[in-house]
Amino acid sequence: MNTQQNQVPQDTEKLKEIPKWARRYAESRTAPMIVFFLVPLVLVGMGFLSVYCFLKGIFILGVIVIILCVAAFIYFMIAYDRYEARYFVKSGIPQIQGIQQIRKYLPLPLILCVVLSVILEHHGVFPAYLRQPVSALFVCPLLLFANWRLVKSGFIGYLWAGLYGLWAIAILFKVPILTFPGRWAGHELVAIPVTGLITGLIAYIYSRYALKKLKTTAHLEEDTNEQYAR
């Protein structure tokens, strides 16, 4: 009897964690983010495949790959918003308002910074292989600010900025895996979707963990209510 009485206060403390795990699960659902970055990477791969086919003289296959790539891109642009809306409706938890605000307000300053960096590169301020580290000077602060100001309690923006910054540092130290030869070395158009995809996968795994903790705590609440009913 004493054991059961001692167990009830402990269970009550654990039940207070339900809002915490529900919030963390809602903040880390990144399946749409994974799709958003995975599809462009696949399209880039198809683009390289078509170039390879043309270089090897396989023109028919190269044309077919280009047609498929263009068709997939058009379909993705049309269908992605519907897919994202269905995902959040199916989950029963709406998308965080801060994420929507980031998608609305972040692209313009990013575009302006990219244009400025292109102009500076064109005037010889920095070489082409430093394109990604230079972009990190504005991408990382923008992601950090957006996460702090709009999402507040989430961690995705911090993680994404950290990975993008680490990629920039790797290029500065000429790490072989992340430093590509030629003019496209460490291009931000590659680094952004790759780091975004890794961020989405990590957050998705964490969302599964948060959901498991939430379900466990919810079952504990049911057991506690049954004990009180007795």
Image: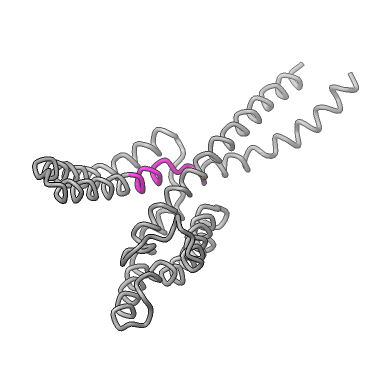
Give percent across and percent down for residue 13. Answer: 76, 37
Outermost residue to the right:
2
For the N terminus, the image quarter is top right
Q: Residue at x 9, y 45 (%)?
A: 59
Indicate left or right for 79 with 127 as reference: left
- Judge whether residue 197 is colored magenta: no
Q: Which residues are magenta?
A: 28-38
Q: Residue at x 37, y 82 (%)?
A: 125
Q: Is residue 34 magenta?
A: yes
Location of residue 168 with respect to 8 vertically, above or below: below
Residue in the foreground of this view, choosing between 173 and 70:
173
Number of numbered markers:
0
The picture quadrant where one finds residue 17 is top right
- Secondary structure mostly seen in magenta is helix
Q: Is residue 180 left or right of residue 79?
A: right
Residue extending furthest top? 230
In this rendering, the answer to whether 187 lies above or below 87 is below
Snapshot quadrant of residue 208? top right
- Residue 65 x, y percent position in the rendering: 17, 42
Which residue is more in the foreground, 204 or 218?
A: 204
Residue 178 x/y as whole percent: 44, 57
Q: Nearer the viewer, residue 206 or 38?
A: 38
